Image (cartoon, coloured by chain):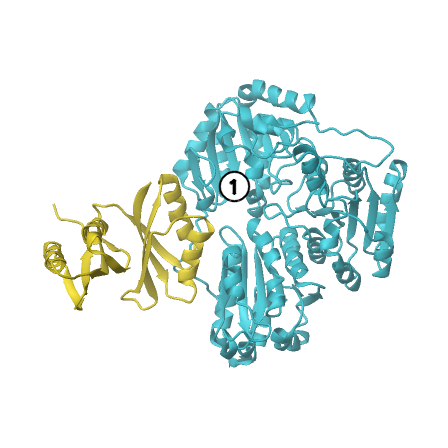
């Protein structure tokens, strides 16, 4: 089943998030990640939801989201038409020679070390889903203590002039 | 004008056309009840259980086509409404349910009689509101009614804290209602209508499937006209009964688990299934992979989520059923005016008629009264002109099969949720809407007891509702499944210690009748139905009668057991 990124504009009112989340749990749809934040219009929130499903499930998800009364707009992004980023912190065990290797990995992926102690480093990484997965897989052998991810945010690309 | 929240609520209800309010007082709505006597335009019906208030409002709404309204207190009052709300939601019935709530300052503190009813009912309402400021009350009520009745209708709940009821503000009635996030689409796309029309002209074996949406959108007139002009046979879902006259030669019967042989066979053989306002419930389709295997499917529904939810659809039409059918018929009559519909359908209609005639609905009569016999007797005595409510179970299916509904809004039944306890209060609600009509509820001896206390409501309001209890001493539908599919392991379906329904009715101040012999059925029924008082009619029927045909769960529609 394919991964899909959905962007939802919703009235910023109590319970709106719960209506969206309740739809996914009540109808047995998956939520892989969910990000909610305000927009320029303080009465509107922007949600980015990543989910898995075949075409039939996706069609239902889109229609059901539309049906929620405070939902203003629902868009599904395909890879080419949108930019997508996620941020994460990774706290990784870092002692002895591992410290150098971790720093090299950090550099290659253009991450930042945001906190460090005598035996751990916390790395801030930003990128699309695949990049963050790649970073995690490289850091895994050093011993990952903790991961915190924001979930994806996405935005449609501007139309390019001819 | 400065007014309290309680005043604003009742005045707003009146402006929304509410003339009947089903309710039950309590601490968190006492301010509203304090105000109520000053609003004589609103007739309050005091029920005996909050669940019944919602079912009654639902019955009122189904029978009249208006929005049903009810009022209950916080906490247990609110939680008692949940079954009623879920039943209305499953059948797309327009309701506004008002619940009292603890004062805003106490919300979230586990106060006395506090529940988060907005949270509890979020998945079973079309939408719901918690009103925290009295200034928002009138606009919220306006939105609630607009949401309840527009698009695909449904129940809307308004949770109203006690301090908001008491607070005073300037009352301004918003004439307009608009919500940027909610714009139901009524007008179907013309290209889709053309596609349906074209498919009809090409089809050799078309069939119409009439669902509850036909009744909701007042489309039964145009559906009947279209079917007759284009010679298309019609099957109905449970919710669609009455949407097409059962007495018409084109009527195939009800479809699905307890559908007629003709209706289920027609769906199996049709090459074009035009589904109007139905949502392909599992009780309708049977085994999905074997459903309408030879058909192209056109699906007309106001709710886009209904389309392609369960069944693959080739021609989706999103919009109002009535507008869509009008458009399709117009195209057929103008663009395809030369088509000889009668000739095109001759062979197919011969086939469907053969199915109807070779395997009609049957039952054996004997020394005991058969439940099907009772339904036919009531049909005869009322000439099909009554409003019929049902509870849920075997009797519900027998009513669906044997009453031969000919008019929309004459069958009130909990189709989607299948809520026992629905029928009796729904009948009370319908009788409030139509005081002069005959209103009858068919019940089993099990389901009547789920809201039997409402007999007091009927007596107090002098509502001549007649409850026909098809008494077989069993929870019959479950017993039937146990017999057919669970090795006759009759676990907990024999109803012991049933009350004497005649004495019970009399104890409430209603009338009670008992009928035990087939030869007494017609005369006794006639007597019982003609009393101006509410009555229980306890009819002792064959104890182990089953509903046939039956499509076993998970089987295809053509794998039905006929006897």
- Above or below: residue B11 compared with residue B506: below
Chain identifier of the residue bearing label 1 in the image = B
Q: Is residue A31 left or right of residue B319?
A: left
Find residue B260 and report its image quarter.
top right
Q: From this viewpoint, is residue A20 visible? A: yes
- Above or below: residue B127 compared with residue B244: below
Q: Residue at x 44, y 39 (%)?
A: B308
> Which residue was labeled with disc 1?
B279
Residue B469 x %, y %: 78, 47
- Above or below: residue A36 compared with residue B191: below
The chain shown in cyan is which? B
Residue A92 x %, y %: 21, 60
Q: Is residue B493 left or right of residue A61?
A: right
Quarter of the picture holding the C terminus of chain B: top right
- Above or below: residue B189 compared with residue B360: below
Q: Residue at x 47, y 76 (%)?
A: B133
Q: Nearer the viewer, residue B500 or B197?
A: B500
Q: Nearer the viewer, residue B182 or B110?
A: B110
Helix, strand, or loop for circle 1?
A: loop
Q: Is residue B459 left or right of residue B561?
A: right
Q: From this viewpoint, is residue B1 visible? A: no
What shade does chain A have?
Answer: yellow
Residue B176 x %, y %: 46, 64
Bin the neighbour count of mark 1 within 10 Å (Cα to Cα): few under 14, some 14-19, many 20 and up: many
């Amino acid at each position: 089943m394919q991964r899909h990124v959905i962007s939802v504009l919703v009235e910023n009112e109590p319970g709106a998030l719960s209506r969206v989340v309740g739809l996914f749990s009540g109808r047995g749809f998956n939520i892989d990640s969910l990000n909610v934040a305000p927009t320029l219009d303080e009465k509107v929130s922007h949600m980015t939801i990543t989910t898995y499903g075949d075409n039939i499930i996706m069609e239902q998800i889109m229609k059901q989201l539309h049906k929620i009364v405070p939902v203003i707009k629902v868009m599904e992004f395909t890879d080419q038409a949108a930019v997508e980023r996620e941020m994460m912190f990774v706290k990784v065990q870092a002692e002895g020679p591992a410290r150098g290797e971790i720093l090299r990995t950090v550099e290659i992926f253009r991450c930042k070390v945001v906190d460090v102690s005598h035996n751990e480093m916390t790395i801030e990484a930003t990128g699309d889903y695949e990049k963050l997965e790649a970073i995690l897989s490289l850091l895994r052998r050093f011993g990952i203590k903790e991961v915190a991810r924001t979930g994806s945010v996405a935005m449609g690309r501007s139309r390019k002039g001819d | 004008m400065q007014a309290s929240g309680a005043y604003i609520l009742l005045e707003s209800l009146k402006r929304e056309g509410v003339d009947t309010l089903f309710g039950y007082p309590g601490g968190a709505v006492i301010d509203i009840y304090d105000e109520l006597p000053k609003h004589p335009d609103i007739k309050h019906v005091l029920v005996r259980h909050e669940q019944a208030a919602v079912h009654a409002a639902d019955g009122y709404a189904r029978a009249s086509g208006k929005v049903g309204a009810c009022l209950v207190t916080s906490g247990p009052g609110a939680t008692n409404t949940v079954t009623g709300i879920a039943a209305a939601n499953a059948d797309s019935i327009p309701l506004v349910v008002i619940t009292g709530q603890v004062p805003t300052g106490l919300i979230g503190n586990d106060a006395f009689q506090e529940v988060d009813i907005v949270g509890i009912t979020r998945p079973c309402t079309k939408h719901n509101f918690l009103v925290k400021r009295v200034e928002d009350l009138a606009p919220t009520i306006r939105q609630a009614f607009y949401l309840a009745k527009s698009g695909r209708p449904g129940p809307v709940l308004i949770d109203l804290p006690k301090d908001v009821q008491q607070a005073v503000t300037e009352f301004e009635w918003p004439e307009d209602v608009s919500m940027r996030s909610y714009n139901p689409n009524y007008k179907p796309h013309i290209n889709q209508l053309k596609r349906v029309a074209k498919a009809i002209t090409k089809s050799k074996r078309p069939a119409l499937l009439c669902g509850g949406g036909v009744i909701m959108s007042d489309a039964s007139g145009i559906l009947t006209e279209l079917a007759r002009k284009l010679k298309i046979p019609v099957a109905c879902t449970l919710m669609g009964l009455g949407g097409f006259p059962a007495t018409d030669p084109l009527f195939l019967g009800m479809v699905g688990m307890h559908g007629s042989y003709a209706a289920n066979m027609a769906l199996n053989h049709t090459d074009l299934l035009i589904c109007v306002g139905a949502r392909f419930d599992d009780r309708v389709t049977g085994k999905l992979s074997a459903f309408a295997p030879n058909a192209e499917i056109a699906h007309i529904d106001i709710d886009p989520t209904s389309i392609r939810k369960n069944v693959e659809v080739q021609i989706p039409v999103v919009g109002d059923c009535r507008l869509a059918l009008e458009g399709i018929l117009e195209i057929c009559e103008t663009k395809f005016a030369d088509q000889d519909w009668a000739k095109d359908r001759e062979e197919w209609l011969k086939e469907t008629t053969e199915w109807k005639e070779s395997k009609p609905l049957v039952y054996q009569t004997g020394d005991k009264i058969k439940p099907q016999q009772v339904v036919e007797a009531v049909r005869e005595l009322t000439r099909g002109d009554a409003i019929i409510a049902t509870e849920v179970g075997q009797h519900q299916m027998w009513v669906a099969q044997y009453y031969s509904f000919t008019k929309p809004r004459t069958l009130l039944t909990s189709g989607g949720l299948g809520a026992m306890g629905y029928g009796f209060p729904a009948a009370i609600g319908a009788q409030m809407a139509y005081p002069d009509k005959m209103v009858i509820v068919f019940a089993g001896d099990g389901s009547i007891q789920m809201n039997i206390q409402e007999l007091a409501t009927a007596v107090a309001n002098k509502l001549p509702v007649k409850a026909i209890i098809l008494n077989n001493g069993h929870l019959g539908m479950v017993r039937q499944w146990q017999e057919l599919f669970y090795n006759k392991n009759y676990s907990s379906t024999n109803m012991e210690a049933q009350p004497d329904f005649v004495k019970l009715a009399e104890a409430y101040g209603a009338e009670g009748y008992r009928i035990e012999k087939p030869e007494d059925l017609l005369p006794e029924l006639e007597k019982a139905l003609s009393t101006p008082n509410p009555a229980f009619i306890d009819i002792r029927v064959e104890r182990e009668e089953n509903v046939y045909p039956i499509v076993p769960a998970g089987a295809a529609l053509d794998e039905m057991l006929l006897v």
